[in-house]
Each structure stands twice: as structure tokens, then as C-alpha cells.
Image (spheres, rainbow, N blue to C red):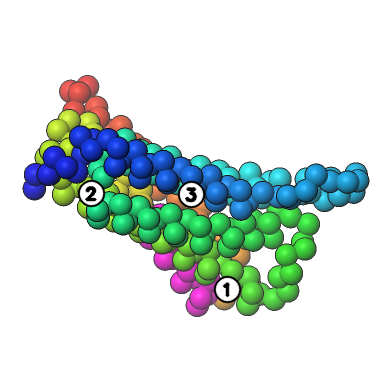
Amino acid sequence: MSADPHLGRKHGLALHRVEGFSDAVFAFAVTLLVVSLEVPHSAQELFHTMRGFVAFGVCFGFLTMVWLQHHDFFRLYGLSDRTTALLNMLLLFVVLLYVYPMKFLFTAMFGDGSTGIQTHAEIKTLMQVYGLGFLAVNLVLLAMHRWAWRFRDALLPEPADRISARGAQMEFFMNAAVAVLSIAIARFGPGDGALAGWVYCILAPLHTWRGFWIGRQHRILSGA
């Protein structure tokens, strides 16, 4: 399928508006993670606030990864068509919904225990909510890439770019699959739901393998 010239960077203003608005939403999402809106008035308040820095850092890291994936998509494809814009808006909507469950989960893990979680059932429900958010983010990113892949003949003439695009699709598919597994364990598995969190560790070897695959494809392409 060939891409209409209106899809690409010939419409730089439209693309700039999409990316600019997206950056503003990501910046707003980061502000929702702020540990405290007030400067501590005592040492005890400062120490209490500092307990939330680890959770804030982890959440900030996750948002940074999503922003980088979003940035890489537009760097690779440069699309500004209506479908891409709508999928992009859906991604931003999901990210904003995802912020508070993510913040609550990591505050519960690294904070001072003041989140109010009292039962194993609440932990399992929290893991399901977090998993649904993680799943939604990756499904939307995958949908954006699958839509753009339709126009690869026009937008990705370089084989190296196609390898990168396929690697990105693999990343989001793997993330979504692990999220589904985590949700299933949290919903139907025994115990307090901790296993539903540990299952995300599977992503490390999966993405290591993906990195080796991408490297091998580039070596084959270069004839090394």
C-alpha cells in the first residue's frame, strides 16, 4: 500500500501540532506524579515527603519510556493523518488514566505503608487495574505501529528502518502478552497477588532476546 503524500512530513504544521500537544499532555501527566505540592515546613514533613521519591522516580521512568516510544514512532513514520491523530489521542487518554493506578501501586511498594491497602483481595484488584493500564498503553502503541506499517513502502524505504519498526511491534506485543498473563494471575491465581507483579520480570529476558534479534537482522543486512 502506498501512502498519500498528505500523511507524511509534507504537512509539518499538522505533525508539529500533534507532537506539541502530546508533549504537553505527557508533561501534565508528570505533574500528577508530584510527591507534594507544598514545600515541607518541618524536618518530619521533609522525611515523610522523601519516602515518596523512589515511587516518583519509578513512575517517572515508566512515563519517560512511553514518551520515548511515542517520540520514536513519529521520528520513524512522521504521520499526521486522521487515524494516527485519533490513535494518538487515545494513547494520551490512556496514559492520563494510567498515572494514578501506577502511582498508587509504586507508592504502596516503596512508600511508608499509608496507602490503605488492607486485604489480599485489594492487592489483587490493584494488580488487575495496573495490568489493564499497562495492557491498554501497549495495545494502542501497537495499533499505531500496525496502522503505519501499511504505508511502509512509501515511508520506510530503508530496510534498517523496517527492522526497527518490526522490533517496536514485537516490543509492544510482548508487553501486552505479559500484561494479560499478569491480569489472569491476579484474577484467578492463588495467594496475595504478588506473583502477578513478579511476572513482569519475564520482560527482561524477552526484550534481551528481541535486542539480539534486531542486532542479528542488522548484521545480516550489512553482510557482517
Looking at the image, is mark 3 or mark 1 nearer the viewer?
3
- Residues packed near mark 3 inside 10 Å, few (<14), some (14 to 19) or many (20 plus): some
What number is the disc on residue 83? none
40, 66: nearer the viewer: 40
Lower sequence index among marks 3 and 1: 3
Lower sequence index among marks 3 and 2: 3
At label 2, which amino acid type do we have?
Answer: Asp
What number is the disc on residue 81? 2
In the rendered image, is residue 208 in sight?
no
Q: Quadrant of residue 99?
A: bottom right
> Disc 3 to disc 1, how far (Cα)?
27 Å
The image position of residue 132, as x and y in percent, is: 46, 66
Residue on which the image places disc 3: 25
Q: Badges 2 and 1: C-beta atoms under 8 Å apart?
A: no
**Could you tell me which residue is drawn at 17 percent across and 30 percent down?**
158
Q: What stretch is highlighted in magenta?
A: 175-189
At label 1, which amino acid type do we have?
Answer: Thr
Q: In which quarter of the image is residue 50?
A: top right
The image position of residue 144, as x and y in percent, is: 29, 52
- Residues packed near mark 1 inside 10 Å, few (<14), some (14 to 19) or many (20 plus): some
At label 3, which amino acid type do we have?
Answer: Val
